[in-house]
Amino acid sequence: MLFPTLSFGLFFLAVFAGAWLLAGSNEWRKIWLLVASWIFYGWWDVRFVALLIASGVLNWAIGRLIGAAQDDEKRRKLLVGLGVAVNLCILGWFKYYGFFMEQAEATLRALGWSRDLAIMQVILPVGISFFTFQGMSYIIDVYRRRTEVAGLLDMTLLMSFFPHLVAGPIVRASHLIPQFRRVPDLTRSMVAMALLLIVWGLFKKTVIASELATGFVDPVFFDPAAHTSLDLLLAAYGYAVQIYCDFSAYTDMAIGIAALLGYRFPHNFNQPYRAASLQDFWRRWHISLSSWLRDYLYIPLGGSRHGLERMCIALAATMLLGGLWHGASWTFVVWGAIHGSVLAAERLWREFRPEGWPKVTHWVGVFVTFHIVTVSWIFFRSHSLEHALAYFGGLGAGSWSTTMLTPLGAVLVAMGMALHFLPADGTRRAAIRVRAMPAGLVGALTGFAILVVDAMRPEGVAPFIYYQF
Amino acid sequence: MNAPWIVPQIPAVSCAVHVPSPVDLDDDAPAGGRPLLWTSRVVATAAAFLLLFNAGALRSWASELSPGPATDPVIAAADRWFAATHALGLDVPVETMRGWWQAAQAARLSTGDDQR
């Protein structure tokens, strides 16, 4: 069930009505939301609802055991290690088993031991990377005494809550469980912002991202050799816009949907392509993942506390693993390696920039950062390293005469870029106006906006890019 | 309801973290009374607007349901509702906009014949 579909709209109307009709009992309200979340998840593959429940119960039980061992640090450490290991095993089995078996087979073949290994086809449950990371952060936070031990209902709802379940944002226990303690308040401000985020997200996903994907980016990436260098260049920009509009649209809608149920989700995007350095980019792109990687990987690996060399190693390792988190493929490893290397290079440059050398101006920084990110997206989007290299080969072929990009596609790419340079508080100011309007007018405007988006959307909507992660 | 299986029995530290959310408008203006009633009216109005002016989407959705005793009445009702709104011309706005959009999609910069 995808957000921008009528099926989801009808599902959400029922969930919304039930959640507020049950506002007299917080526990029943949460049970309602939990069951709704399982139905939402079961829509893809009902078998994996059991995995979701098992994962929630497992993390709840380990959190509880860690909490019970208040004064026994050795036992707490053992339990948190066990919990992280089990979560990683679940993730590893579903996501990386095939990849590692293929690598093992290739290595054995290279060593002259040519034999086909029996590799099972393991189906990847939607959103597994998100909910296992959420589970791990919970037990680590309980271990670090940064979050309270949650009840079973709260823990399973935290991990299953449908707005963030399949593609984030990664909402931590310390953010959401305190909100589960009582029936949340709904304010006009929240609702006005939620409606704007939902409509805006619908537009970004179903108009900009879908149109660019089907009309231009997908055909070019499918067969780079059949397109001119100009097409390849424009498709790289197009994909940069597409992935931003696709993923930020999901986040906007997730935040809006949660807000209509009374819950506050954190920011996940902040105009990332206006970043003037890669460090700045990661403060603006998928903020819930970058802060997760910072808190649970980069800092435990040493962070910046143990000298420059250790910091560079920590950065590289964090980004390599961050790349692998996205998928079991060398293209994601290269994507992570590019980001890790450039982040480390930025730190080294800040440290060792020769005296008297001019500082890079802000706009040069924005231009360079955007192009580094765009180059890395080519690896991210390609299905293999050979494919990515063929893409770069085509870019260097020097055929700049024609393009299949339509005027509409060019406008959408320009629009996707222009979004990054609009006032950052534009939506907030619009929400302040909307909340003062009568309900009938807001409803009619919302209906009209959805009607306009529906007139522009293609037949059917492709799944969000981040569903595969 | 306060069953032990859903409420932790372990003494816990209080460490709720306030994280900024896009839905926090952070201003002191009065938020307006009876927000749930206001929200319900907004949702109902938007749903009614779409039911009137976008019945084609409902019909498309219903037509993708697997036929059966439970879904046949839904499919028939969606068809009848679409026919009624079409007869009143309520689908003209969305069809007009769709036509504009399709014209924009069809526009080309060049023939593209000289691609390699």
Image (spheres, coloured by chain):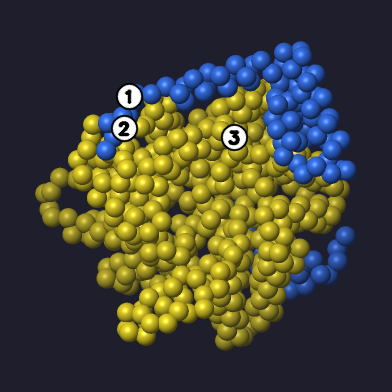
Chain colours: A yellow, B blue
Residue A145 visible at all: no
Mark 1–mark 3 Cα distance, whole angstroms, equals 26 Å
**Residue located 88% across and 60% down the image:** B1
Chain that bears disc 1:
B
Verify CB contact (< 8 Å) between mark 2 and mark 1.
yes
* The label number, if any, that marks residue A403 in the structure image: 2
- The location of residue A270, given as percent across then percent down, is 46, 42
Within 10 Å of the Cα at label 1, are there few (<14), some (14-19), or many (20+) other Cα atoms?
few
Instruction: Please say if A199 is above or below A365.
Output: above
* Furthest-top residue in this view: B88
Which residue, given by chain and number where applicable, does mark 1 sit on? B110
Q: Is residue A63 left or right of residue A285?
A: right
Chain that bears disc 2:
A
Q: Quadrant of residue A361?
A: top left
**Residue located 38% across and 64% down the image:** A330
Q: Secondary structure at mark 3?
A: loop
Q: Secondary structure at mark 1?
A: loop
- The location of residue A359, given as percent across then percent down, is 19, 45
Q: Is residue A441 left or right of residue A254?
A: right
**Residue located 79% across and 66% down the image:** B6
Mark 2–mark 3 Cα distance, whole angstroms, equals 25 Å
Which residue, given by chain and number where applicable, does mark 3 sit on? A459
Amino acid type, mark 1: Ser
Name the residue nearer the viewer: A341 or B96.
B96
